[in-house]
Structures are given as C-alpha cells and as structure tokens.
Image (cartoon, rainbow, N blue to C red):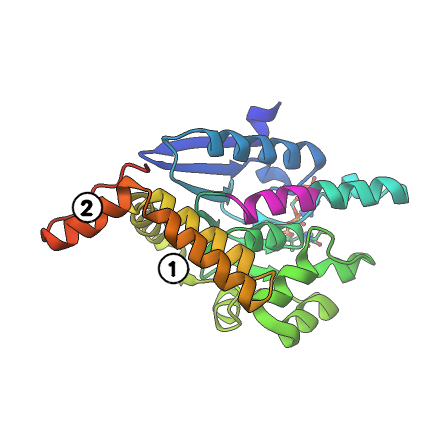
Amino acid sequence: MTESLLLTADRGAVRTITVNRPDKLNALNAATLDALLAAFDAAAADETVRVIVLTGAGPKAFVAGADIAEMTDLPPVAGRDFSQRGQRLMRRIETFPKPVIARINGFALGGGLELAMACHLRVAADTAKIGQPEINLGLIPGFGGTQRLLRLAGRAATLELCLTGSPVVADRALALGIVNKVAAADALDEAIDALADQLAQAAPLALRGILDCIHVGGECAMEEGLAYETAQFGLMFATDDMREGTRAFLDRRKPAFAGR
Ligand code: COA
C-alpha cells in the first residue's frame, strides 16, 4: 500500500521521493501523509542519502492539494486531526537535517503548495500553477499555508493568494519569492539534478548546521539566533569535514567531504 502511494529512487546520494497518485493529481490523503512521514524518517536514518528531491508523478501535478474526497464528510474533530497530521509532516520536512528540494512539475495547490513551502528549496517548471485555493471550498489552508507563505512571501502576497484562491504562474511565484528558480518544463530535470548534485557534494554536517541556524533563527529573537549560530559554528571545528575543506582550499584541491 505504502509503496504504491510513493515511489522512491536513489541516484548516488540523491533520493527522489515521488507522490504517486497521478489519477488524483497526487492529492494528499491521510495514507499518503503517513507514507511521506515514514519515507522522510527512513531518509534521515540512511547515511548514504544526502539530499532529498520531492515531486509528484505524472505530467500535470506536483500535488493538487489535500484530498477533497477524503475531507468532504469529516466531522470537526477529524478535520482538526487531519490538519495536525499534515502539519506534523510539514514540520518534519521543514526541520529535516538534510536539504529537501521541491521539484514542482505542475499544479502545486493547497496542501501541494504547503508541502512545497515546507521544503528548503523550490524549483518550478514554467508550466506550474501555484496557489492556495481552499477559499473556493469554504475552507482555509490547514497544513501551515497561512503561516509559511506569510514568512516566505510577506503579507501582500499571502493575503492575495489565500483570499482570492487564484493561482499564480511560475514566473509570478518567482517574483514573489515563493520559488527559487523556474526552468522550462523540458529542462526541469537538468536544473534539479545540477542543484541536487551541488548539495550532495557539500559538507553534510555544515549543511545541517545552516539548516538548523536558519530554522531556529526564523523563530527567535536576534540575540538568541546569533548565540545559536555561534554554537553551531564552534561545533563545526569538531568535524573532519571542516579540516578537509579548509586544508583543501589551502592545498588548491577539491575537498572530499565524508560527513564526519
Ligand atoms: N483532492 C482530491 N481529488 C483531486 C484533487 C484534490 N485536491 N485535485 C484533483 N483531484 C482529482 C479530480 O477529482 C479528478 O478525479 P476523477 O478523475 O476521479 O474525477 C482527477 O484528480 C483529475 O482532476 P481534474 O479536476 O479532472 O483535472 P483538471 O485538469 O480538469 O483540473 C485542477 C486540475 C488542479 C485545476 C483541479 O483538479 C482542481 O481544482 N483541483 C483541486 C485543487 C484544490 O482545491 N486544492 C486544494 C484542496 S484543499
């Protein structure tokens, strides 16, 4: 069951996790949320994995939202539980110790945009459509969308996307700061591979330190954030990778980082 909801493939140190419900535009039902959480836990524990790419199966959608068919008859407490289930997954991805790239190959709507925003970097095909259309269902975003979009793109864009429910095209999402890069649909894989390979060759513990600092810093006061950065910076001096990186620079050679 779990295997059919997700596809997982490794290319070197890059693990691609694909939401695999193309006939439902990869809508997130409860079982898919659970499968994703398990897949991220497995990727965290696997030392050979250094970077995650998250995407959707088929030519049309990254993820077209939370599963509307599953939600339509839910009683209130189950609706709250569904939101918590989604938020738990998004938080796991947001605080993941390895870089996670969203490969936005089509519609990223509702829970799909929320999933993409929980990732650390977003690369979109120029054909992608991105939005928070819950208002059209008499709903509001429930997997962190109001909060992450606000922090990512500011009040004006968040109010526009959430209040109107109208999606934006990839280039506008880029201008709003919602995605990091837009690639022609037929060049999306090339762009993803280049970015993933660059991250896969970087020092894993330093990547983790950066992810931690930015995550903590986004949620605390400046003084606390600076203190946290200093502690993480000092920790890097305990790593072989820091010695290797600095020595390789001085020796004018390419460093090889072991993640220790
Ligand atoms: N939940 C459940 N099923 C969904 C879905 C979702 N969020 N989004 C799409 N699907 C299903 C459709 O019901 C349809 O299933 P069916 O063939 O069994 O009827 C299938 O995926 C294909 O979708 P369809 O609407 O026929 O494709 P389209 O190309 O005409 O339209 C969208 C694409 C994305 C514009 C449209 O599917 C849509 O608006 N989806 C809902 C987006 C949304 O509101 N997301 C937020 C949810 S909280």
The residue carrying pointer 1 sits among few (fewer than 14), some (14 to 19) or many (20 or more) residues within 10 Å by Cα, namely few
> Residue 25: x and y, percent?
61, 44
Q: Which mark is residue 184?
A: 1
Q: Is residue 239 left or right of residue 90?
A: left
Q: Are marks 2 and 1 in contact (CB under 8 Å)?
A: no
Q: Measured along the vertical axis of the image, is residue 193 above or below residue 122?
A: above
Hey, what amino acid is under mark 1?
Ala
Q: Is residue 199 left or right of residue 212?
A: left
Q: Measured along the vertical axis of the image, is residue 71 above or below residue 231?
A: above
Q: Quadrant of the C terminus?
A: top left
Secondary element at image label 2: loop
> Residue 106: x and y, percent?
52, 53
Hey, what amino acid is under mark 2?
Pro
Q: Could you tell me which residue is drawn at 16 percent across and 49 percent down?
A: 247
Which of the 4 image quadrants contains residue 130?
Answer: bottom right
**Front-most of residues 103 and 158:** 158
Q: Could you tell me which residue is drawn at 53 percent across and 72 percent down?
A: 176
* Mark count: 2
Where does label 2 land, which residue? 255
Which of the 4 image quadrants contains residue 147?
Answer: bottom right
Q: Nearer the viewer, mark 2 or mark 1?
A: 2
**Front-most of residues 112 and 49:** 49
Magenta residue span: 86-96
Find out if the beta carbon at label 2 lies less than 8 Å from the nearest ligand 1 atom.
no
Q: Measured along the vertical axis of the image, is residue 153 above or below residue 100?
A: below
Q: Quadrant of the N terminus?
A: top right
Specify the principal SS of the magenta part.
Answer: helix
90 drawn magenta = yes
